[in-house]
Amino acid sequence: MTRFGMIVAYAVALTACNHDSRSASGGVASAAASSPPPPVAAPAAPAKPFEGEIVVTVKDESATHAPSSITFDVKGDKVRYGGATSNVHTIANVAGQFAYAVNDSRRVFANFDTNSPPTKAPAAPEAKVTKTGRSEKVAGLPCDDWSIDDGTEKVDVCAAKGIAFFDLAKAPRSGDAEPTWAAAMTREKAFPLRIVAHDKAGKEEYRAEATKADARAVADSVFEVPAAFNHGDLTADMRTASLP
């Protein structure tokens, strides 16, 4: 082969090589462009508020005549509870700020406004809540250790945030319907899975602890007063319906 022929053959080979290289790189680029983007993890769904039944067992150390156990039904901002041997149960709408005491056997109810009137000073000062930073589990639910002190009574609780709570006082009246420690829990929207109450001298009055927490659907009718019931006085009945 002449020198001229060798030069022509080399040029042809070089051109073909460059063409193949461009085709190969173009193929990779095309494949990359057509590949789907990597999947992005969906954000975690927010935890649903607790809905279901919580059973609390009570140990009375000071003859306060608290019920031996109390069953709470909770759904959103609604709470219904009743003592094991009481004829009366309580229904509360925490967001709506009203509550009912209901006696099914007598077909009677009493209603209470749980919000203090804006033009009237609270009947009792708000209790001081101290959050210790310690956490644990009671009845399978996470809770935080708090101390609540109203000057006459100190209550240590393990508070489950996001679970509505309400506790009608022994002698409730509109604007002052709960004991001060319970009103603090209601404001915090936290359920006391364990309660240890002491008097001003430090003597234990009673303790209560959740022994069962059953997450399940609760019908709206559970939180309603039957239309056929009449308004009446349930003061005597309520003394054995709630925690002290």
Image (cartoon, rainbow, N blue to C red):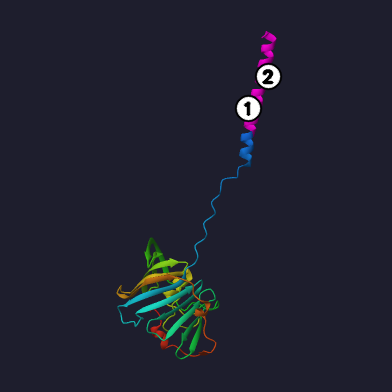
Q: Which residues are magenta?
A: 1-26
Q: State the separation of the CA atoms marked 2 and 1.
A: 14 Å
Question: Percent position (x, y) of residue 157?
Answer: 38, 69
Query: What residue does disc 2 label?
Result: 12
Question: For residue 178, what is the image quadrant?
Answer: bottom left
What kind of residue is marked 2? Val
Position of 35 with respect to 230 (left or right) is right
Checking the image for residue 21, the label placed there is 1
Q: Judging from the image, what secondary structure is the residue with disc 2 in? A: helix
Whether residue 69 is visible here, answered yes or no, is yes
Say which quadrant the C terminus sits in. Answer: bottom left
Vertical relation: 9 (above or below) 190 = above
Mark 2 surroundings within 10 Å by alpha-carbon count, few (fewer than 14), some (14 through 19), many (20 or more): few
Question: For residue 37, what is the image quadrant?
Answer: top right
In the depicted view, which residue is nearer to us: 136 or 175? 136
What kind of residue is marked 1? Ser
Position of 215 with respect to 59 (left or right) is right
Question: Percent position (x, y) of residue 59?
Answer: 32, 76
Question: Percent position (x, y) of residue 167?
Answer: 43, 77
Say which quadrant the N terminus sits in. Answer: top right
Residue drawn where x is 65% and y is 19% of the image: 13
In the depicted view, which residue is nearer to us: 217 or 67? 217
Question: Percent position (x, y) of residue 95?
Answer: 53, 73
In the depicted view, which residue is nearer to us: 241 or 126? 241
Residue drawn where x is 43% and y is 67% of the image: 160
What predominant SS class does the magenta segment belong to? helix
Vertical relation: 143 (above or below) 111 = above
